[in-house]
Image (cartoon, rainbow, N blue to C red):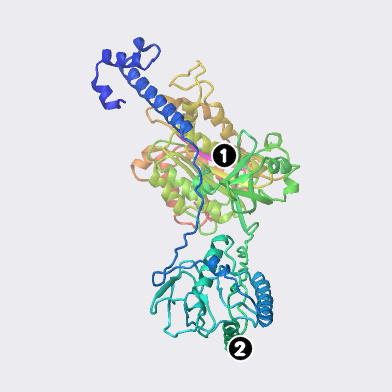
Amino acid sequence: MYDILELNNMVVTELKEIAKQLNIKKSETLRKQDLIYAILDSQAIAASKEDVLKKQNQPPLQKRPRHRKVEKVKYNGQQKSSSEDVKGDYDQTPAEKDAEESIIIKKEKEQQLNNLFKKENVIPPEEDIIVEKAKIEPELPLFYKKAVEPEKKTLIQKTDKPVEVINNDSLIPDNEIIEVKEDIIYPQEEISYPQEEMQEENDFSKESNNNFSEPLIVDNNMTLELQKDIDDDLKKINIQDSVPLPQRKIIEKPKPDKIFDFDGIINSSGVLEIMPDGYGFLRSADYNYLNSPDDIYVSQSQIKLFGLKTGDTVEGTIRPPKDGEKYFPLIKIEQINGRNPDMIRDRIPFEHLTPLFPNEKFNITGNGKSSLSTRIIDLFSPLGKGQRGLIVAQPKTGKTVLLKEIANAIAANHPEVYLIILLIDERPEEVTDMARNVTGEVIASTFDEPADKHVRIANIVLEKAKRLVESGHDVVILLDSITRLARAYNTVQPASGKVLSGGVDANALHKPKRFFGSARNIENGGSLTIIATALTETGSKMDEVIFEEFKGTGNMELQLDRKLSNKRIYPAVDVNASSTRREDLLLQKEYLNRIWVLRNYLGDMNSQETMDFMLDRLSKTSTNEEFLISMNDN
């Protein structure tokens, strides 16, 4: 037998010779490592075959009969067999015959009792033994064993009391210790028996194989005198209650612990994302609607029954996962998008809802949120429910701070509006600052995340907003920025072969346009407002192309000026370039007339002069209405 180390040290020719000896096929064409493994495999197969043949050739094992070894005890160099005593012929008198019959009757009674109690083999009496009181019935045999543990040992000390014996046989020597492996119950009195009876009991124990106790067989040679002594001894025994029969231990089956039912105890909610296989998961906003441990499984039957779509905000009861389940399953749906599930089943899809111009203005100056930034926006670019606004800004002009003030103002004055701040490709510290200082749902994907994550988060936020609008809610999405979102869509878009200037794919801007174009005011209730920032003058041709594609698609535009921010004039709003379409639907007529007069007055000024004038006049009044009324005094 060769091992792998020996084979590795051999050359190829030696390996081929070994392979020929082992009858390995195609050994000439094999490489060295293949030869080594082939030799090892062949050796292993041959060794296994040899083991099988050895096992088949071995003769079957025969069970050796078990014999109980009984040692013959010699007393004073003499040994007698019971057969010699039985052969003694002598004539019996009538009295002896009556005594013999009485002994036989007693033996039959003892045998019946022993069969009832089912005791173990009788220990042959060798000498007079003193033990504790026996608990037996009046008709029990003289000796029987008590069932005990097999390993327990008892030492019994023999006594020196002489007993008169027939035939003058020599007795067992005194002070001899006998080792017994079971506990034995003997009568209290001392009783001795001749050697002949002991020999008969030894012969009888050889034939016993069921370990049952049998009554003591008295020899026919026993004289009346000895029998009378035995009867007298029996009368002296203090008979107590019988030994209780061994009983089976009734082991009660342990009661299983009470199984608590946690179904329906916990309510949970999330935004539904339907998988291609038909089932779905409720995603948590804490994980930006991505895969998380808090996901709740929604079955395919539930989705079909309630007519659920991706983006539905579902609230219901859940239960803990069972064995083999990974997620918490949804067991009962209570609300969908804040409405009754029966109402949602008959809803009109978002694409078939009638869009209108915004006709209800957002109040962003009341309830303690009246800052200079919000007052200027409210004067020159008012926001309405369903507005599609674009904040055009150069880098470092304060657009993120402006978004934060708008968000806090809307949240404070319009609690019925569902506010979502969507940050795409932004800095992580800005995300943390926005989440801590804005009352609303902040969903973010920072610039260190891949583009497909930007796209996935934006899609599920848009679907959620659409489902809420279908249910009649007002939703506001503040997006920063739509330029970075369009870049992400361009990255994940498969190449179509049509590339615009700046490296923008011709089909890449369709999805961001659909996102921005979803903002609308819905007839008979519901609106989706999107205020997005667009970057300009970044030095990137792609950003310029993206801005040109979105220019003119919104119905509100707010221009920020880098010159003002460089001079630390905030808000850096270019008043003359900022406006809202159909602002007459949002403002009262008398306020609208005064704003037109104000625009005519500011039209001849540049952006810096305009902002200096507005900041000076607005700081002297507390509200915009007060400012417009004070215009007559000037």
Residue at mark 2 to residue at mark 1: CA–CA distance: 102 Å
Q: What type of secondary structure mainly makes up the magenta span? A: strand
Q: Which mark is residue 412?
A: none
Q: Residue at x 43, y 25 (%)?
A: 542
| Residue 19, image x, y percentages | 34, 16
Residue tagged by mark 1? 460
| Residue 565, image x, y percentages | 37, 42
Question: Of circles 2 and 1, which is in front?
Answer: 2
Residue 448, placed above or below residue 333: above
Residue 180, placed above or below residue 495: below
- Give the structural element (helix, strand or loop) at label 1: helix
Query: What's the residue type where badge 2 is placed?
Result: Lys
Whether residue 186 appears in this view of the structure is yes
- Along the viewing direction, whichever of 551 and 604 lies nearer the viewer: 551
Q: Which residues are magenta?
A: 528-534
| Residue 537, image x, y percentages | 40, 30
Quarter holding the N terminus is top left
- Residue 421 falls within the magenta-colored stretch: no
Whether residue 386 appears in this view of the structure is no
Question: Could you classify mark 2 by the number of other residues whose Cα lies within 10 Å: few (under 14), some (14-19), or many (20 or more)?
Answer: few
Residue 263, placed above or below residue 276: below
Residue tagged by mark 2? 235
Q: Choose the circle earlier in sequence order: 2 or 1.
A: 2
Q: Residue at x 63, y 42 (%)?
A: 584
- Along the viewing direction, whichever of 68 and 629 lies nearer the viewer: 68
| Residue 129, image x, y percentages | 47, 80
- Give the structural element (helix, strand or loop) at label 2: helix
Query: What's the residue type where badge 1 is placed?
Result: Ile
Residue 470, placed above or below residue 247: above
**Which corner quadrant of the image does residue 582 belong to?**
top right
**Number of numbered discs overlaid on the protein picture:** 2
